[in-house]
Image (cartoon, rainbow, N blue to C red):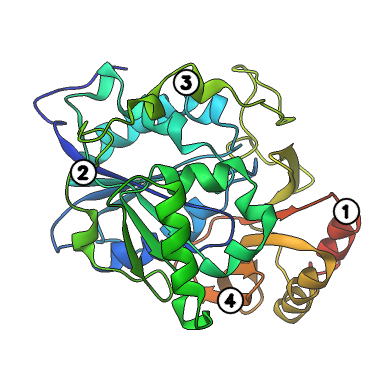
Amino acid sequence: MSFDNQSVLGVPTNIITGFLGVGKTTAILSLLANKPKGERWAVLINEFGEIGVDGSLVQGQQHDKAQVFIREVAGGCMCCAAGVPMKIALNQLLLKAKPDRLLIEPTGLGHPKEVMAVLSSEHYREVLSLQKNITLVDARNLSDVRYTNHDTFNQQIAIADTVVGNKADLYQNDDLEKLASYVAEVSRPNTKVILAEHGKFSLSELDGHDTIHGHSIADEHLLDHEHSHEHHHTHNHVHNDNKPLASEAIIPASGMLKAVNEGEGFYSIGWRFSSDKIFDHQKLISFFTKLSELKVERMKAAMITDKGLFGYNLTLDGLTETSLNASSESRIELIADTGDESFEIQLLKCIK
């Protein structure tokens, strides 16, 4: 797909990244809520899970006249998402939205260097104006080797122009000091560190050409194409261009579609339900609350219930519920250390 360079040129573009449950989607929603009136913004979202929920959550909280355009690429293996599917989605999004700003949210388990390599390619050189990379980090996780020993976690910090210490209201006295020290060790010189609560930070943090793409430091190896593909692609989804993605496939007559994915030390399982499947709100809340006891690392959902349309977000800090303006179907995705068939059994019991 080619661009009409008269209509899509120099779009200010930011990568908003961070590990599982750190609050990337919440931060993007906050940025969208505060975007300048009259501006058209576009958001490209990649998810680890095959179902894709973030797009529904973001779109479901926008008003008709918000001038926000959302596109999602599910199935978070970066060999796919930063390849043909990502390029097609990005091209279509830019042509449809002709945005004043583009936000890109890679999956929390994805390698951001590969996304950066695509955005820095000759194909997008005139189309995109690459601005600051923003990485959200929960400083409390710096005491957990599951994070500090994870290549993706460190890579996200390494590419940052600004590190946002999110959920700062939950920090202990020495957490900020630990964050500043870790960023100084892992990231590049002069990487900025700020604090935020509920993903809220100033729009001004987005502006300015990022130091990698601006070539102001000697870290060009971060964009080296061969290096960006050195990790092992352990995801189990099938790379088949002729097979529709689970996030876009037609839901079968049963009214339910299920998809799984595995890689980077995590397992995802997700479902899509047709609009005629109405969930019991009370039972759903009870099920979601119990998930934290079952070693579920992450859960997101956009659900049609007997009480209305709601978005759900479960992290290790608890469950949040948000009203949605629109949702054409129910979607739910779980990420855990291992798979558990009981998840589906309990979920189906929540249907009225």
Q: The residue under label 1 is which amino acid type?
A: Asp
175 w.r.t. 266: above or below: below
Task: Residue 32: give x, y in percent of width and height.
Answer: 30, 62
Relative horizontal placement of residue 245, taking residue 204 as reference (left or right): right
215 w.r.t. 168: above or below: above
Q: Are marks 2 and 3 in contact (CB under 8 Å)?
A: no
Quadrant position of the N terminus in the picture? top left
Sequence-wise, the earlier of marks 2 and 1 is 2
Labelled disc at residue 99? 2
- Give the residue number, with chain letter if any, for mark 3: 84
Decide: few, some or many residues near mark 2? Use Cα within 10 Å; few <14, some 14-19, many ≥20.
many
Q: The residue under label 3 is which amino acid type?
A: Val
Sequence-wise, the earlier of marks 1 and 4 is 4
Task: Residue 280: give x, y in percent of width and height.
Answer: 74, 75
SS at circle 3: helix
Task: Residue 330: give x, y in percent of width and height.
Answer: 63, 58
Q: The residue under label 2 is which amino acid type?
A: Pro
301 w.r.t. 233: above or below: below
Sequence-wise, the earlier of marks 2 and 3 is 3
Q: Nearer the viewer, residue 96 or 232?
A: 232
Labelled disc at residue 320? 4
337 w.r.t. 265: above or below: below
